Image (cartoon, helix red, strand yellow):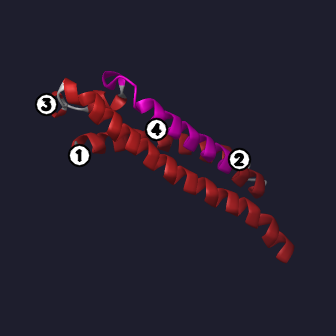
Amino acid sequence: MEHMRRVAYETVLRACGFASLAIFCVMIGMSFQPKLAFQAGGILTILMSAILMLKAYEARTKDYRRTEMWLYLEKHQRPPAAYAQWASATVLRETYLRFALWTSMIAIVMWVLALMIPITLILR
């Protein structure tokens, strides 16, 4: 089960890394207006968090043989078929929700930064 957790963590981390790269590119494109860049980053990060929560909900009923995690498990590391659906769903759900929590915290930081930028300009 721990090996399944590690593989699930790696697959979700890779997907979140690609999404974060896209969000970063959008923010760099808007870097001429920092407030707008952080607002866009906050919105896109909230969207990523919502997608992760949707994936966590979907993980309960998704066929374990059609998950990326299952493809990365070696044949000898895969649990028996009777146990595999529950184990796969549980591990993926926990992993998606953990990443959704982290991305929502990052979104909050971005929104706070977007709110702080005009305040710092006023205080100058």
Q: Earlier in the sequence, mark 3 or mark 1?
A: 1
Under circle 4, the secondary element is helix
Under circle 3, the secondary element is helix
Under circle 2, the secondary element is helix
Q: Position of residue 108 (x, y in %)?
A: 63, 57
Count residues near mark 4 (Cα–Cα under 10 Å), then give few for <14, some for 14-19, many for 20+.
Answer: few
Amino acid type, residue under disc 2 in the picture: Ala
Q: Which residue is mark 3?
A: 76
Magenta part of the chain:
40-66
Q: Nearer the viewer, mark 2 or mark 1?
A: 1
Q: Nearer the viewer, mark 2 or mark 3?
A: 3
- Residue drawn at (64%, 43%) of the image: 44
Question: Is residue 53 inside the magenta stretch?
Answer: yes
- Residue drawn at (29%, 45%) of the image: 6
Q: Is residue 67 visible?
A: yes
Q: Which residue is mark 2?
A: 40
Q: Position of residue 105 (x, y in %)?
A: 56, 57
For the residues bearing labels 2 and 3, Cβ distance under 8 angstroms: no
Q: Which residue is mark 1?
A: 2
Q: Is residue 23 above or below residue 58?
A: below
For the residues bearing labels 3 and 4, Cβ distance under 8 angstroms: no
Q: Earlier in the sequence, mark 2 or mark 3?
A: 2
Amino acid type, residue under disc 4 in the picture: Ala
Label 4, label 2: how many angstroms apart (C-alpha)? 20 Å
Q: Which quarter shows the N terminus?
A: top left
